[in-house]
Amino acid sequence: MTKLPSADWFRQQDDPKVAHTKTEALDDITVLDLSYNSFAGSFCTSLLAEFGAEVIKIEPSEGDFLRTCTPYGILHQGVGLNYLSEGRNKFHVTLNLNKAEARNILKGLAIKADVLVETFLPGTMDKWGLGYEKLKDINPKLIFASITPFGQFGPKSRNKMPDYDNIIQARSAIHYATGEMLHEGKTYDDMPWAVPTKSGPWIGAAPAGQFMAAGILAALYWKGLTGEGQALDCATSEAYASFDDWAYQWYQGTGKVCERFGNLDIAGWLYCFAPTKDGAVFLGALRLEQWKAFVDTIGKYDEWGAEQWKTMAPFMSEDQQLRWADLVFEETRKYTNQELVDMSVEYAKKGRLAPITTVVAPVVDPMNTLKDLNWNDRGLFTPVEDPVFGPIIIAQAQYKLTETPPRTKWACRPVGYDNGFVYLKHLGYGPVKLKKLKKTGII
């Protein structure tokens, strides 16, 4: 029998502490990042930069608006907390694309680039003479990736609605179905808390960035086979809405919309968060056997008649879920988070229905996530020793590769920090030329 690799072997191969000693998968790829005021675009190029691509972030002289989007209005050395992370690993240059000379400079960069990512409203790049059809004439191998609110075509593609995360969430069915239920016959005035509830920061924008990064990797592979570039088109609202796929199938089959159901989920039982002595846990028991196992775990198997349950159907309606939730929550409040976790683990070993058990996951706050021994052992929160901003926590790559591991090399850079390096390397511009460009407002 072949011996499986040990945990020590995996640590030696892909621990973030040794990532800097290994090759980067995209170290010969140059990416022009023209994303502006777009977390989706910035996230996309952050992923490519983690894999080693030379990402050149091109900003106006005042910097990307995204730099100032920050919780509580806090800036660290003039930069918002979000951008400290999503500007990571990139080279930052300035270029005023409203000026003709600046657009010619961009063409010079595009001739040598492998990928260009842009997030302007459709038509903007064409108006500047920088659209895909123009740039592919000077670089047929260029991969031109556009991330926009409604895509490059469609009746709303030219809509000027900004691409803000909350707008992306609001336009998706996910936002509609998230939050406390509005009881029949009640209005928002009666229940002001029973409104659609947004997800966490940037959750709406991140899928488009991730999908586009995957699309770019596929396009790079295709270019390697054929030598051909191509244009990529991703709409942010479309990307996020795709995560709610079963809701559309449900509507197609039943003609019914999945309404908000608060902490419960009409799609399954037991599937909800439950209060405890010291917080809350998530309970997952979508199969009848798991639901019975949970009831047995809390000592209610005989009292609630679990032996006679044959299907999940009696527990799936809204009124029954509300009834059973009250009974379940009354029991979970008797225990701490850890006690419920331990009870579930122990039940899987020697319970009546073992090894079947219920999924029990404590709800963890940011402080305890940051202190989690597992994530720290895997290097997720290892501070980056940034030359500009000093030691700063930026979540390291969430995936490990044994031969070409992704890595975080630095946080974001100040506006125009790399003008000298990038313009000299790619266009041969020295200090005199850069001084002139700055004086005329080109950079």
Image (cartoon, rainbow, N blue to C red):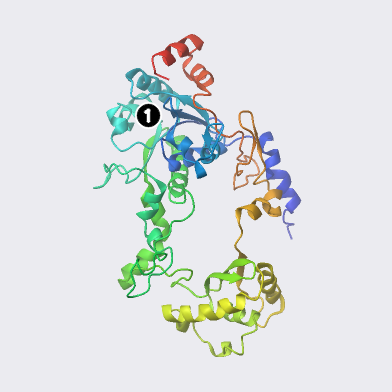
User: Which quadrant: the N terminus?
Assistant: bottom right
- Front in this rendered view, residue 186 or 268: 186
Indicate left or right for 380 with 82 as reference.
right
Q: Is residue 218 visible?
A: no
User: Could you tell me residue 177's position as x and y percent?
Assistant: 40, 64
View extreme (left): residue: 155
User: Could you tell me residue 29's position as x and y percent?
Assistant: 51, 31
The relative height of residue 230 versus residue 419 in the rendered view (above or below) is below
Which secondary structure, mark 1?
loop
Q: Where, by quadrant of the figure, is residue 351 drawn?
A: bottom right
The relative height of residue 262 versus residue 416 in the rendered view (above or below) is below
- Front in this rendered view, residue 340 or 277: 277
The relative height of residue 340 versus residue 393 in the rendered view (above or below) is below
Q: Is residue 224 visible?
A: yes
- Front in this rendered view, residue 122 or 197: 197
Indicate left or right for 335 with 3 as reference.
left
Q: What residue is shown at x 38% (from left), y 55% (from top)?
A: 241
Residue receiving disc 1: 140
